[in-house]
């Protein structure tokens, strides 16, 4: 018996298992996203980029010449660079650039949208970058843009000087008209005009194109770069989707998770049966008693015998599951044979009166069952069907079995009590005093009474029978059970005072480094009463109302 206390979801191995389970999703994103990025990149129109550079001279020679302090020297350098870049981005500069480049098919706003001006690092150089579909146009516009800015900057720097010089010249003309060239005022005005002319020339040199643009280079699209970025994005997206899908997936992935939700010990792992046995509704304990699959049921039997050591009253065991297709009927039948092969006197009772299935394993389709006994149509002794199961299990020390129920010889026996005609209200029937008396009678005659019941979450029969049994065994199938189902099943089990013996994992394949085994699918749906279920139970189908996949993986209820 294995106590499971490991919690999943927090270790690195848990994350790796998620990635391994959803690897197809990660690979799909890792292929589709970069492929789409490269595909759309190749369909884009090529864009070319060209740049020109302008040097901004901070030295104000005009101020030095006049002896006037230059206030711009105390402005923050970063702020000054941003100011120049902002000045270059006005529509007037763009308009001048278009005229210089002789481009007439776009507006200044179009040029500003397709260009950028920024300081080049920590230098006093502005970089003018223009993007265009034609590499030659990109080159011409970048150079024209830089030259237009130098002209515009010169105009702004010399605007006040030009106005002052114009005013001086006008006063000089008035004095000349009055023939006052010898007047000291005229001489001072002449000196001022010459000084202003010199200052104007010096101011125009504060912005200079130092590197004209070269032929534009392609900057878009870049299929290789986009493919690499797409691959990285695809991997991130794939991993995100994988973990999101796993978080939304309520399926149970391991026996540890089942034990954690049910708070029960794991008794055995019962992997999928050979397909040949599953299709023929045969039991591994009867047809392949020496196979590895049969050994897993012996493990389950041994663990239940250990549980019996703690309580001598453990005789009647109810076998149930949370939902359909979990293998509880097959587990009950194989477990009964395993106990019988170990020399125990065993009664196997089919109280799954919604869709009985045990009769198929033993060829008892027309046998009278527990409902006949409860109605008084037949005695319990006549309804019990003895089963011959071949040579004894090695655990019985080589004793030969005696198939007769109640034999005085100390050998293993197995008797099956099938369902019989289905009652109109199975839920009420299993709770009757007569059913309880039959089970008590069987308990007094046999070492073990294994009772197959419907899934606990489908109907309440299992909980009703569990209240009069000595122990409850839960069968869970990993590819069927869901976490909310386990939580609800635990709530139901806690409401019943009967000891919960543990759980067995059916349909087990491989998990957490363990080996393989055999289990069965639970292959039918549940109705509520009516004899139509009985008619379907004897048609000789592989299974009733189940999907073909369920037949291949288990073939029984």
Image: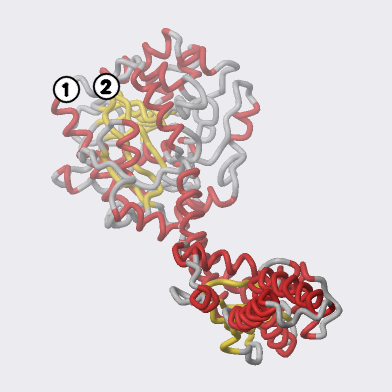
464 left or right of 178? left
Quadrant position of the N terminus in the picture = top left
550 left or right of 334? right
Residue 96 spot, x, y in % from top left: 77, 77
Q: Which residue lies furthest to the top in this view?
A: 433
Give the residue at mark 1: 311
Are discs 2 and 1 less than 8 Å apart at CB? yes
Residue 131 appears in the picture as rendered: no
Query: Which of 486/155 is in front?
Result: 155
Local SS, label 1: loop
Q: Residue at x 40, y 54 (%)?
A: 18
Q: Which residue is drawn at 38% across and 44% down?
A: 506
Q: Looking at the image, how many numbered discs can be counted on the residues? A: 2
524 left or right of 121? right
Query: Which of 168/346 is in front?
Result: 168
Local SS, label 2: loop
Q: Which of marks 2 and 1 is in front?
A: 2
Q: Quadrant of residue 432?
A: top left
Relative to 272, does residue 522 appear above or below in the rendering? above
Disc 2 from disc 1: Cα separation: 10 Å
Residue 293 spot, x, y in % from top left: 32, 53
Query: Which of 511/92 is in front?
Result: 92
382 left or right of 201? left
Disc marking residue 403: none
Residue 91 appears in the picture as rendered: yes
Relative to 525, does residue 11 appear above or below in the rendering? below
Disc marking residue 499: 2
Residue 133 spot, x, y in % from top left: 74, 82
Q: Residue at x 57, y 64 (%)?
A: 83
Q: In which quarter of the image is residue 535?
A: top right
């Amino acid at each position: 018996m294995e106590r499971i206390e490991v919690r999943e979801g927090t270790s690195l191995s848990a994350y790796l298992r998620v990635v391994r389970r959803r690897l197809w999703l990660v690979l799909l994103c890792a292929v589709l996203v970069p492929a789409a990025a490269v595909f759309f990149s190749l369909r884009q129109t090529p864009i070319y980029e060209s740049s020109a550079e302008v040097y901004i001279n901070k030295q104000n020679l005009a101020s030095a010449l006049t002896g006037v302090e230059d206030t711009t020297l105390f402005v923050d350098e970063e702020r000054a660079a941003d100011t120049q870049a902002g000045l270059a981005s006005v529509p007037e500069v763009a308009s001048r650039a278009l005229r210089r480049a002789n481009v007439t098919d776009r507006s200044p706003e179009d040029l500003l949208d397709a260009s950028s001006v920024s300081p080049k690092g920590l230098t006093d150089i502005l970089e003018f970058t223009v993007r265009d579909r034609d590499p030659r146009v990109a080159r011409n516009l970048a150079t024209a843009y830089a030259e237009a800015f130098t002209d515009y900057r010169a105009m702004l720097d010399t605007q006040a000087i030009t106005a002052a010089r114009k005013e001086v010249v006008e006063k000089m003309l008035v004095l000349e008209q009055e023939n006052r060239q010898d007047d000291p005022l005229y001489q001072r005005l002449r000196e001022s005009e010459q000084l202003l002319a010199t200052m104007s020339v010096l101011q125009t040199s504060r912005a200079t194109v130092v590197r004209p643009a070269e032929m534009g280079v392609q900057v878009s699209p870049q299929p290789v770069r986009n493919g690499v970025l797409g691959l990285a994005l695809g991997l991130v997206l794939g991993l995100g989707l994988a973990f999101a899908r796993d978080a939304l997936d309520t399926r149970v992935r391991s026996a540890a998770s089942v034990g954690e939700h049910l708070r029960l010990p794991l008794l055995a792992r019962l992997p999928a049966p050979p397909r040949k046995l599953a299709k023929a509704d045969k039991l591994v304990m009867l047809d392949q008693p020496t196979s590895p699959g049969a050994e897993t049921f012996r493990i389950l039997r041994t663990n239940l015998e250990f549980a019996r050591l703690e309580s001598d009253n453990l005789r009647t065991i109810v076998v149930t599951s949370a939902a359909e297709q979990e293998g509880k009927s097959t587990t009950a039948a194989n477990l009964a044979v395993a106990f019988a092969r170990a020399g125990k006197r065993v009664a196997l009772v089919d109280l799954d009166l919604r869709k009985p299935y045990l009769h198929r394993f033993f060829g008892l389709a027309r046998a009278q069952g527990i409902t006949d006994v409860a109605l008084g149509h037949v005695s319990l002794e006549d309804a019990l069907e003895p089963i011959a199961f071949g040579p004894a299990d090695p655990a019985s020390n080589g004793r030969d079995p005696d198939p007769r129920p109640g034999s005085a010889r100390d050998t293993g026996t197995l008797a099956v009590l099938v369902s019989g005609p289905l009652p109109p209200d199975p839920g009420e029937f299993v709770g009757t005093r007569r059913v309880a008396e039959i089970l008590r009678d069987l308990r007094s005659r046999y070492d073990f009474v294994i009772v197959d019941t419907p899934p606990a979450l489908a109907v309440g029969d299992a909980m009703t029978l569990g209240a009069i049994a000595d122990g409850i065994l839960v069968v869970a199938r990993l590819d069927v059970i869901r976490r909310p189902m386990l939580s609800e099943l635990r709530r139901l089990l806690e409401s019943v005072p009967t000891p919960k013996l543990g759980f067995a994992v059916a349909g087990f394949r491989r998990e957490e480094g363990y080996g393989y085994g055999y289990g069965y699918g639970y292959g039918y749906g549940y109705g509520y009463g009516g004899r139509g279920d009985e008619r379907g139970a004897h048609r000789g189908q592989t299974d009733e109302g189940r999907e073909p996949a369920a037949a291949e993986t288990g073939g029984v209820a």
